[in-house]
Amino acid sequence: MASKNALKLDSEHVKKIREDYERKLNEMRAEFKKLQSVEREHRKMQARQAMEQQQLLKLRSELADMKKLKVELMQKIKEEAKKAKASELAHSKKVAGLEKETRKKDSLIKQLENKDRQREMFLKRTTEEITRLRQQNRQVVSFFASIRNDAGSVLIKSQSIVDAKRELTLIECMENLKLREEKG
């Protein structure tokens, strides 16, 4: 009977050890699965970090390009403004000279008309002179019209400069927003 009890105890002991072993084995398997899951998450996180790092480098490169473009645009705007100002000044001088010349010619026409009234006997010759002077005056007027058209194109260039300045202001706003996002 003692040996039956001993066998029963051994059998229970073996059963208990087996159950304990299986329980520990199941716990280790569960822990191993958790570790594998953590490792997968770690790899995903590393991949995300690498992608975000590349994106950050790309954004920094784009920002540097935009800053360079801004500097170039500012230089172009300054050059265009300088050219437009010089062109406007040249046109103003030209117009002033032509106006002076026109005033002189108008004065001459008036003098000739006064002489015409005083000298009826030279009517034919004076009339021909007035006709010639009026033709010259028409040429001057058409010349003025072409100069006014040129002045209109200068105004259009000035408007394009204003538009370029607006674009630069927008670029600066975008840069400020990107910088805030990076800081935030």
Image (cartoon, rainbow, N blue to C red):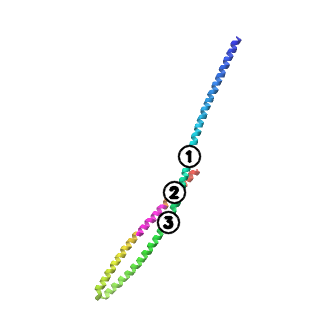
How many marks can you see? 3
Residue 171, disc: 2
- Mark 1, Cα crowd under 10 Å, few <14 / some 14-19 / many 20+, is few
Which residue in the structure is indicated by mark 3? 79
Residue 102, disc: none
Precedes in sequence: disc 1 or disc 3:
1
Instruction: Name the front one of labels 2 and 1.
Output: 1
- Mark 2, Cα crowd under 10 Å, few <14 / some 14-19 / many 20+, is some
Precedes in sequence: disc 2 or disc 1:
1
Quadrant that contains the N terminus: top right
- Element carrying mark 3: helix
Q: Residue farthest to the right? A: 2
Which residue in the structure is indicated by mark 1? 52
- Element carrying mark 1: helix
Residue range highlighted in magenta: 150-164
Q: Position of residue 129 (x, y in %)?
A: 32, 83
From mark 2 to mark 1, how far is it between C-alphas?
Answer: 24 Å
Tag 1 and tag 3, C-beta contact below 8 Å: no
Q: Where is residue 64 in the image (x, y as percent from the top left)?
A: 55, 55
Residue 157 location, quadrant: bottom left
Q: Residue at x 31, y 85 (%)?
A: 126
Which amino acid, mark 3? Glu
Q: Where is residue 58 in the image (x, y as percent from the top left)?
A: 54, 50
From mark 1 to mark 3, how far is it between C-alphas?
Answer: 40 Å
